[in-house]
Image (spheres, helix red, strand yellow):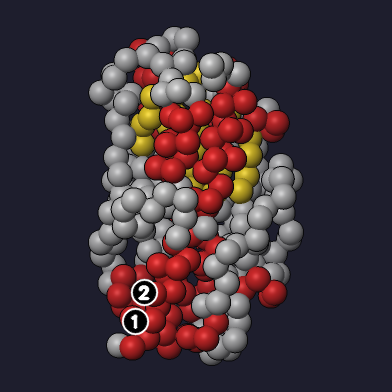
Amino acid sequence: MKYSLTLIALASTALTAPTQREERGLFPGFGDSSSGSGFGDLFGGGSGSSGSSGSDSSSGTSSASGAASTPSSTSTTTSAQGTDALGDFSDLLGGSSSVGGSTENGVTDNDGCQPLTFIFARGTTEMGNMGSVVGPPVAKQLASQTNNKVTVQGVDYPADAAGNASMGSSGGPKMASLVKQALKQCPNTKVVLGGYSQGSMVVHNAANSLSADQISGAVLFGDPFKAQSVGKLDDSKRKEFCAQGDPVCLNGGNVMAHLSYGKNAEEAAKFLVDASGVSTS
Ligand SMILES: *[C@@H]1O[C@H](CO)[C@@H](O)[C@H](O)[C@H]1NC(C)=O
């Protein structure tokens, strides 16, 4: 029990991000807690090495092809708790992803046309259709950087472990159809995409069924497919954020790093605005 409390404190620390206005998803990308195996696996099979903080054991390749310098994670020390505590944390999640996330339906509600449309796919176990870790802060940044000239839409898809195992195919078609709907309603809007964790695989999947002129930019966070293009989108219009230590995008063994992407929201939004060519004045 004491471990649980300690870990909540650690998680809160790790989740401190520019906009902490609501509860954050605890461990998107690590959703299948009912199996109890997720964290153990991520920490090297639960071998009990209680000192393993991920960042110095990064076995993965350094960074994705298109990735610019990825700032190192601010959250470092999960190490003291060891694997027993991680087991407790899995129990805490209990298979019920109980924390909040937000929802945006600017496209499906046909809220009116804006120069920019942002469609986002959240990570595994995140709630709402935007989740909480990185979708909402990027949307907020886009609004402020474009003077509110953006329509925001989350992808309604299960974001569960089964979908994750199918590598984006549970949300990809849905995201692709949202892109088409956005362009049909607003032929002049520039559509940019975002995805986090499983959601980044959703972006790849969606883009494979879209033409080059239907997407103007994409930002991906903790992307297992970080080495792959986004459909026919020029690679200069795709940006991968893979934090040092993030095991999901194969950059180490620090689970907390996978939760760190809120701090990249401003940079990601700027990238999308630039890629879209939408005027910010
Ligand atoms: C989702 O899939 C990716 C890539 O296969 C994997 O790295 C990650 O651990 C998976 N997450 C869950 C919750 O299964």
Q: In the picture shown, does residue 71 fall above or below 43?
A: above
Mark 1 and mark 2 in contact? Answer it, CB < 8 Å.
yes
Cβ of disc 1 within 8 Å of ligand 1? no
Tell me if 17 is positioned left or right of 159 in this view: right
Q: Residue furthest top?
A: 187
Q: Position of residue 240 (x, y in %)?
A: 62, 44
Q: Position of residue 229 (x, y in %)?
A: 65, 37
Q: Position of residue 106 (x, y in %)?
A: 32, 26
Residue 203 visible: no
| x 37%, y 14%: residue | 113
Separation of residues labelled 1 and 2 (CA atoms): 6 Å
Q: In the picture shown, does residue 97 fall above or below 141?
A: below
Q: Amino acid at mark 1?
A: Ser
Q: Amino acid at mark 2?
A: Ile
| x 53%, y 51%: residue | 263
Kindly identify which numbered label has been placed on residue 230: none
Kindly identify which numbered label has been placed on residue 4: 1
Query: Toward the viewer: 10 or 173?
Result: 10
Residue named by callout 2 = 8
Q: Secondary structure at mark 2?
A: helix
Q: Position of residue 168 (x, y in %)?
A: 46, 45
Query: Toward the viewer: 129 or 205?
Result: 129
Q: In the picture shown, does residue 153 fall above or below 1?
A: above
- Quadrant in which the N terminus appears: bottom left
Query: Counting other residues with Cα less than 10 Å from the Cα at mark 1, is it few (<14), some (14-19), or many (20 or more)?
Result: some
